[in-house]
Structure formats: structure tokens, C-alpha cells
């Protein structure tokens, strides 16, 4: 199996493109009909997104998502969205959604004491969400706390409880990175990514619950958790591609020498 055929097996378009491993050309693109080399963006490994950055954004196809089951938390001390998503050869499936929201008497506690009380409540609720089927998922992801902006302390304290509940195995996913992968931009003051953009993107991949309510909530926190899960699945597929390709690339100089 060649590197080109392996990439195509993973659903990546390699037609008329040079294949690089780092800075080394390992599989040149075939010439055009008139014999001239193709003048196209060159995907590289690592860095398969190079080609994407050279053309208008195209939403990821289903073939670019890894096959896995993921639990995702869009965490804060006031509202935490929780989702279970399964990806397989049939597509992307929303298995469950849930909200973690402390009761009013805890939300009303002011200042640092209130944050600690809310974090304690989130801790117990996250452990509850980790039971049953969720205990055997392939990955648990949560939002990487921002370094500036609003709600840093809230996201950080709630994220610590997800980290603790998984014994440190939960994976942080950057919100801006997820938006770049799935919407095409992270957003700026001049061109923000709004809740409506996230909703449109998520619902293009996942069917919203039929019975939306307390048992299967569907709101901005749930959709943000879905976005984090989808981003992890995209990144995991690229990690799988790289893991499969690198041994082949390493063996090529040996084969040429023989």
C-alpha cells in the first residue's frame, strides 16, 4: 500500500497533489495532460490541513471523522452541557444530552464561597454523568479554559472537576480550534461566530432530539459540547492517518536503498 492510497483510504482527497512527509517529497503528483506539473496546494504530513487553508472552507465530510464514542462537557459553574456522541460507518449519532445546573440556593451564594459551592455541586454531577454507558467511552473531552475574556474562573473550576472525575484522562479541546475546524473561522469582533452559526453547523451533522426538554435538552450549551466532540473526532482521525502513514514513510528510504 502506498502513502497516497492509504490517505485515500482515510477519505482524504489526494488527486493531483504532491504528498510530503515534513519537508520531504515522498509521492509527486502525476503531470497534467500537457506534461506540466500541477500547480496546486500540497498536503503534508504532519499538517494535512495545509491544502485546506489554500482554498475556500469546505465543511468536513463524514469520512473525516474518526469512528469512536465521545462524551463531551461544555463546562461552567452555572450551566454545563453534556453529550454522548457515537461515530461509525453509518454516520454521527447523538446518543444523549444532559444539563448540569446547580439549584437556585447554590447559584445565589455570592463571591468565592459561591464558586466553591457550585464547583462542589458540579463535581458530584459530573461523576453521575460518568456512570453506566458513559464509563466505557473512547474519550472524554471538555473545553480548554481561555487565557483571557469572561468566565475564565468559572470554566477553569468546572473543568477541574471533569479532570478529577476522569482521573486526569479527559482531553481539553480549544473552543476557537473547534470553530476553525467546523465553521472555518474562530471569530473576531468584526466577524464573530455567533450561536446561530454553531447551531447551524451542529445540526448539519447531528439530528436534534425529538423530545427536547428536561430529559434531552437542546440548547447553546449542549450544542457547544457537540462542537467540542466533533472537533476531537476530526483531530483523532488525523492522528490515526499520521500514525498509519509515518511507518510507511520511514520505510521508503530503506526500500529505495535495497
Image (cartoon, rainbow, N blue to C red):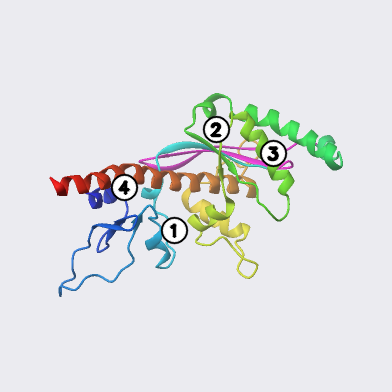
Which of the two discs, 1 and 2, sits closer to the camera? 2
Specify the label residue 169 is tagged with: 2
- Image-quadrant location for residue 114: top right
In the picture of the structure, the residue carrying the numbered disc 1 is: 59
Distance from label 1 to label 4 (Cα)?
16 Å
Q: Judge depth for marks 3 and 1 and give the one in front.
A: 3
Q: Is residue 8 above or below residue 31?
A: above
* Disc 4 packing (10 Å; few <14; some 14–19; many ≥20): some
Q: Nearer the viewer, residue 91 or 128?
A: 128
- On the image, which quarter does residue 214 sit in? top right
Looking at the rendered structure, the secondary structure element under dot 2 is: loop
Residue 147 part of the magenta-drawn span:
no
> Gap in Å between the C-alphas at discs 3 and 4?
36 Å
Q: Which mark is residue 157?
A: none
Q: Which residues are magenta?
A: 76-103
- Identify which residue is drawn at 23% across, 44% down: 251
Q: Sequence order check: which comes first, mark 3 or mark 1?
A: 1
Question: 154 left or right of 97?
Answer: right
Task: Of the two numbered discs 1 and 2 on the same chain, state the one appearing first in sequence.
Answer: 1
Amino acid at each position: 500500500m502506498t502513502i497516497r492510497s492509504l490517505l485515500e483510504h482515510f477519505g482524504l482527497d489526494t488527486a493531483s497533489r504532491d504528498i510530503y512527509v515534513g519537508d520531504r517529497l515522498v509521492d509527486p503528483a502525476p503531470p497534467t495532460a500537457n506534461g506540466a506539473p500541477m500547480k496546486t496546494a500540497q498536503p503534508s504530513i504532519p499538517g494535512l490541513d495545509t491544502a485546506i487553508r489554500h482554498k475556500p472552507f469546505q465543511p468536513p465530510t463524514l469520512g473525516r471523522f474518526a469512528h469512536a464514542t465521545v462524551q463531551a462537557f461544555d463546562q461552567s459553574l452555572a450551566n454545563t452541557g453534556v453529550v454522548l456522541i457515537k461515530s461509525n460507518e453509518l454516520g454521527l449519532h447523538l446518543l444523549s444530552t444532559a444539563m448540569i445546573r446547580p439549584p437556585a440556593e447554590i447559584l445565589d451564594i455570592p463571591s468565592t464561597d459561591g464558586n466553591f459551592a457550585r464547583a462542589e455541586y458540579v463535581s458530584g454531577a459530573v461523576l453521575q454523568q460518568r456512570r453506566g454507558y458513559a464509563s466505557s467511552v473512547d474519550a472524554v473531552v471538555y473545553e480548554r479554559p481561555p487565557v483571557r475574556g469572561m468566565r475564565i474562573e468559572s470554566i477553569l473550576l468546572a473543568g477541574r472537576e471533569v479532570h478529577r472525575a476522569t482521573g486526569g484522562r479527559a482531553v481539553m479541546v480549544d473552543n476557537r480550534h473547534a470553530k476553525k475546524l467546523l465553521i472555518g473561522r474562530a471569530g473576531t469582533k468584526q466577524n464573530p461566530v455567533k450561536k446561530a452559526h454553531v447551531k447551524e453547523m451542529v445540526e448539519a451533522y447531528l439530528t436534534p432530539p425529538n423530545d427536547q426538554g428536561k430529559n434531552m435538552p437542546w440548547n447553546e450549551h449542549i450544542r457547544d459540547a457537540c462542537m467540542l466532540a466533533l472537533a476531537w473526532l476530526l483531530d483523532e482521525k488525523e492522528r490515526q492517518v499520521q500514525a498509519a502513514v509515518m511507518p510507511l514513510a520511514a520505510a521508503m528510504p530503506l526500500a529505495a536503498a535495497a
